[in-house]
Amino acid sequence: MQIRADDVLIVVDVQNDFCPGGALAVPEGDAVIPAILEIAPKFEHVVLTQDWHPAGHGSFASSHQGRHPLETVTMAYGEQTLWPDHCVQGTWGAELHAELKLPQADLILRKGLRRDVDSYSAFFENDRVTPTGLEEYLRERGLRRAFFAGLAYDFCVGYSALDARRLGREAVVLREACRAIDARGSAAAMERRLREAGVVEMPSAL
Ligand code: VGL
Ligand code: ZN
């Protein structure tokens, strides 16, 4: 696929906590890094996202008495999966992985800042209506097709790509530059949703 000047690569949540040794380690999470470093130079525009929660965030199982990671709770906006404490603002786990050297990136977008609303998608919080500002940013800068890589395929990458389609964008997931948490079949479920939404899946080789 020919990359154009108005394409953007969105690198989702390649942070210490999602890599081996982190609080919410995605299997082989760090394996996305060489793949991303290989494809990023083909893009004129790169945006990085960073899961960035306050301590005591509502998506943490520890914030709900007697509840455990991967259980679900009902929040004001609907069902929310619970996670171990992760990507707490200012901690090592929240830092972008040191090997993800992308100094050319246009923007680092932080999400999940509000205690009572999680944000998987880079575009909207989990209430599906509160914007993160990314759509406005891309529009103002004239960026159109969105390519996705990073962590985790079945959560933040997948929901970001679904929202890009919902916003009328072409969306491409670079599958080999992603890894999944795959809790209870979530990777296969996301693959189906992406296909139904018209998201294109490609290997990372562009
Ligand atoms: C993510 C679960 C909780 C992700 C973030 O980046 O996919 N997953 N927070
Ligand atoms: Zn999170």
Image: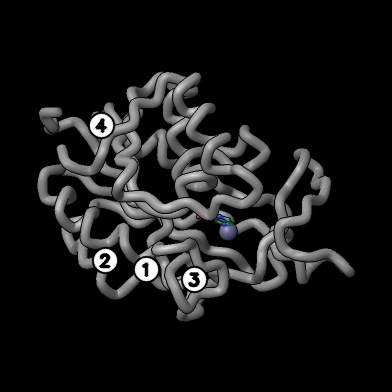
Q: Nearer the viewer, residue 71 or 140?
A: 71
Instruction: Give the CA distance from mark 4 to mark 3.
Output: 30 Å
Q: Is residue 173 left or right of residue 86?
A: left
CB-based contact (under 8 Å), mark 2 and mark 3: no
- Residue that mark 1 sits on: 96
Instruction: Give the CA distance from mark 1 to mark 3.
Output: 9 Å
- Residue that mark 2 sits on: 100
Instruction: Give the CA distance from mark 2 to mark 1.
Output: 7 Å
**Amino acid marked by disc 2:** Leu
CB-based contact (under 8 Å), mark 2 and mark 1: yes
Q: Quadrant of residue 8?
A: top left
Quarter of the rendering occupied by the N terminus: top left
Instruction: Give the CA distance from mark 2 to mark 4.
Output: 23 Å
Frontmost of labels 1 and 4 is 1
**Amino acid marked by disc 4:** Leu
Q: Residue at 29% of width from left, 75% of height from top?
A: 98
**Tag 1 secondary structure:** loop
Q: Quadrant of ligand 1?
A: bottom right
The x and y percentages for residue 196 are: 49, 19
**Amino acid marked by disc 1:** Leu
Q: Nearer the viewer, residue 56 or 97?
A: 97
Residue 140 visible, this angle: no
Frontmost of labels 2 and 4 is 2
CB-based contact (under 8 Å), mark 2 and mark 4: no
Q: Is residue 114 left or right of residue 104?
A: right
Q: Is mark 1 within 8 Å of ligand 1?
A: no
